[in-house]
Image: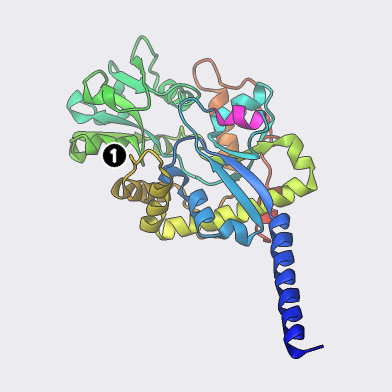
Amino acid sequence: MSKLTLSKMLRTACATIVVATLATTAHAMDKVTLQLKWLPQAQFAGYYVAKEKGFYKDHGIEVTIKPGGTDISPVQVIAGHSADVIVDWMPDALAARESGVPLVNIAQIYNRSGMMLTCKKSSGIHSPADLKGKTLGVWYGGNEYPFFNWMAKLGLKPGKDIHILKQGFNVDPLLRGQADCISAMNYNEYWQLIDAGMKPDQLISFPYEDEGVSTLEDGLYVLAPDLKKPAFVSKMAKFLAGTFEGWNYAVKHPEEAAKIVVAQDMSGAATLAVQQRQMENVAKLITYANTDKMGYLEPKAYHRTINMLLNSGKATVIKKDPGNSAMTHVVWELAKKE
């Protein structure tokens, strides 16, 4: 056999091994579909960063990120088995669970609430005691329960002591003088008011976290039956490990995270300045970022949310305490070993 022929055979064999290795690696990659709660924005930066930076692939998974929207319910998506895991707020998740969709929290990205009531100072509001007699914009669809709990604590009855305006996900009621206060997130609607020309000293905000009526937002939920499958649990642990890396990186590098988010917005409406500002404010809600507790669901916060929903001062969103059945640390603990 000639040296040339042997050389060709070796090159062919090596190429075959490489192709086979790549094929095996690709085949071995677990596939995960994540359904977000809203459109691409820095609220979800950690997931986009984890995918863009290759953190998910480093853990052996291929993640498809599905954006949300006004006509998309993450609960319905996962109930229809079109996603493995969803981002949702705990009030919505627990309500869905009581209605028959067995959601379980496997990780809690935001450990502080970003929700608040933002008011015009010109309405004579300087403290919660000044809310009496005012018109207040309230988000519904499960977001109203912390508000009604707060009003009950203040002794203010809707329709008698305060007027409720069912608010859309915009800031128009405050800008148009239709409401004295509106619901807002610290990373989104508040800044829409500023961008619309209002000055910070014209506004006063009451964060639900500070008022002791906050509920948990932006957690990761899966279906309980799937947690009985070892392969699924292993896949979700890999997903969490990559996700935690993505969020840790996003918090440390807000500008780069914002650029990654903007690239995901097919509408072209997102801007770098707005998304970077949003990322910087989102970071304030992830106080466990870059610590060994990243993504950990605090049992006290979990049960506080449940108690809030059971005692909202109005028709409650849930009627039974699920105990610890709507949460698990098993996947989180496994992720820490990845």
| SS state under label 1 | helix
Residue 174's image quarter?
top left
| 74 in magenta | yes
Residue 16 lies, with reference to residue 101, above or below; the image says below
Instruction: Give neighbour class at mark 1: few <14, some 14-19, many 20+ (Cα, 10 Å).
Output: some
Q: Main secondary structure of the magenta part?
A: helix
Location of the N terminus by quadrant is bottom right
| 58 in magenta | no
**Horizontal and vertical percent for residue 41?**
41, 43
* Left or right placement of residue 99 versus residue 40 in this view: right
**Horizontal and vertical percent for residue 326?**
67, 35
Identify the image's colour scheme: rainbow, by chain, secondary structure or one colour. rainbow
Residue 285 lies, with reference to residue 77, above or below; the image says below
Residue identifier under label 1: 191
Residue 59's image quarter?
bottom right
Location of the C terminus by quadrant is bottom right
Please tell me which residue lies in front, 235 or 305.
Answer: 235
Please tell me which residue lies in front, 239 or 9.
Answer: 9
**Horizontal and vertical percent for residue 40?**
44, 41
Let me know if residue 293 appears in the view: no
Count of labels shown? 1
Residue 294 lies, with reference to residue 35, above or below; the image says below
Instruction: Kindly identify the residue that appears in the image at 60 percent across and 46 percent down.
Output: 107
* Left or right placement of residue 12 versus residue 215 in this view: right
Outermost residue toward the top in this view: 160
**Horizontal and vertical percent for residue 177?**
21, 20
* Left or right placement of residue 259 versus residue 71 in this view: left
Residue 333's image quarter?
bottom right
Q: At label 1, which amino acid type do we have?
A: Trp
Instruction: Kindly identify the residue that appears in the image at 74 percent across and 39 percent down.
Output: 226
Outermost residue toward the bottom in this view: 3
Q: Which residues are magenta?
A: 73-79
